[in-house]
Image (cartoon, grey):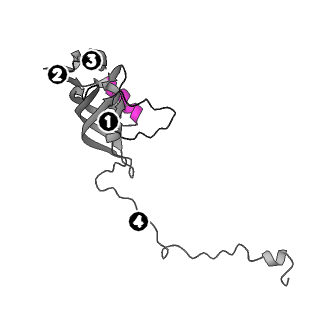
Amino acid sequence: MITPESHPQRLRVAHLNPHSPTPFHLRPDGSVRQALAEELGLEALSRLDFQGSLRAHGSDGWLLTGTLSARVTQPCVVTLKPVRSDLKEEVRIQFTPHLSAPQGDEVEMPDETLEPLGSFIDLTAIMVEALSLALPEYPRAPGAALPDAPTAEDAPADTRRPFAGLDKLLGGGDS
């Protein structure tokens, strides 16, 4: 069995065995989870676990498959009360040397499951990215609802007449 403490979080591609899968298991401790929670704007990250394997794919690529599970606490978008969510996401990323690294600040990747293959595969970075993508965008506390939007019938009649005295100022109307 692989223990999270003894397993590396950054794998050198040249040291991977192409004939058998390389299992991994990351379970960050409390201080790392707290730092991640602050970085991602969470109230708490009480559990985070990422495990799976990395195996050769094709003649020169690698395929990472794994499962990310986490328990996060975020503020409700309506009431700001804490909302706890249990997340479980399947992660699948194919690393290929035939894809160049993106250039610039904002780049659209053709396929989000494809990544350029470098010298290392950073499991921690993959875990953090998978967690940030799995977070609920608009967490809501049970029973929390936005108030109904006012309709045209509910709006007070507009009695202002901003151009009512304009003709008098321009000298076109009777004073």
Q: Which mark is residue 20?
A: 2
Q: Earlier in the sequence, mark 3 or mark 2?
A: 3
Q: Earlier in the sequence, mark 2 or mark 4?
A: 2
Q: Which mark is residue 130?
A: 1
Of tags 3 and 2, the one toward the viewer is 2
Dot 3: few (<14), some (14–19), or many (≥20) neighbours within 10 Å? Answer: some
Q: Earlier in the sequence, mark 1 or mark 3?
A: 3
Residue topped by disc 4 = 148
Three-letter code for the amino acid on which mark 2 is drawn: Ser
Q: Secondary structure at mark 4?
A: loop
Alpha carbon distance from label 1 to label 3 = 18 Å
Q: Is residue 59 above or below residue 165?
A: above
Q: Are marks 3 and 4 in contact (CB under 8 Å)?
A: no
Could you say which is closer to the camera, residue 116 or residue 22? 116
Residue 101: x %, y % from top left: 43, 29
Three-letter code for the amino acid on which mark 3 is drawn: Pro
Q: Secondary structure at mark 2?
A: loop
Three-letter code for the amino acid on which mark 4 is drawn: Asp
Could you say which is closer to the camera, residue 68 or residue 33? 68
Residue 160: x %, y % from top left: 66, 74
Q: Secondary structure at mark 3?
A: loop
Q: Earlier in the sequence, mark 2 or mark 1?
A: 2
The residue range painted magenta reads 31-43
Q: Quadrant of the N terminus?
A: top left
Dot 4: few (<14), some (14–19), or many (≥20) neighbours within 10 Å? Answer: few
Alpha carbon distance from label 3 to label 4 = 51 Å
Asked if the magenta segment contains residue 131, the reply would be no
Dominant secondary-structure state across the stretch colored magenta: helix
Q: Is residue 18 above or below residue 157?
A: above
